[in-house]
Image: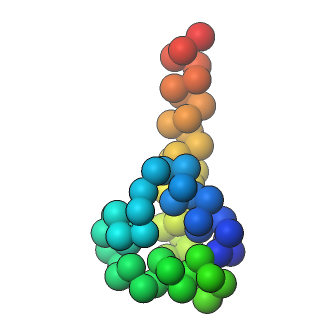
Amino acid sequence: MNGQDVKALRDRLGMTQMEFAVALGVDTGSVSKWERGAPISRLAERVLRELATGYTFAAREAAEDAD
């Protein structure tokens, strides 16, 4: 996961950097740094991937419910 992925996920969730940071339990500086390409810790990357997977699942489920 890179900075563009982090920003794309945050944007899909409709969150500000501050809201995203609070949800992840990090400071806003970390989110900003990640989005600019700073290395992401393994733990943070794992949480971000799980969040992205959950978002994808929820979006699919909502689309199926709409049909």
* Image x and y of residue 39, in percent: 62, 88
Q: Is residue 41 visible?
A: no
Q: Nearer the viewer, residue 45 or 23?
A: 23
Determine the residue positioned at 32% across, 74% down.
25
Q: Nearer the viewer, residue 52 or 7?
A: 7
Determine the residue positioned at 35% across, 70% down.
18
Q: Quadrant of the N terminus?
A: bottom right
Q: For the view shown, which residue lies furthest in the bottom direction?
A: 38
Give the colour scheme shown.
rainbow
Q: For the view shown, which residue lies furthest in the top direction?
A: 67
* Image x and y of residue 26, in percent: 36, 79
Count all numbered tags in the image, as a single digit: 0
- Residue 42 quadrant: bottom right
Determine the residue positioned at 42% across, 57% down.
15
Q: Is residue 45 visible?
A: yes
Q: Quadrant of the C terminus?
A: top right
Determine the residue positioned at 42% across, 69% down.
17
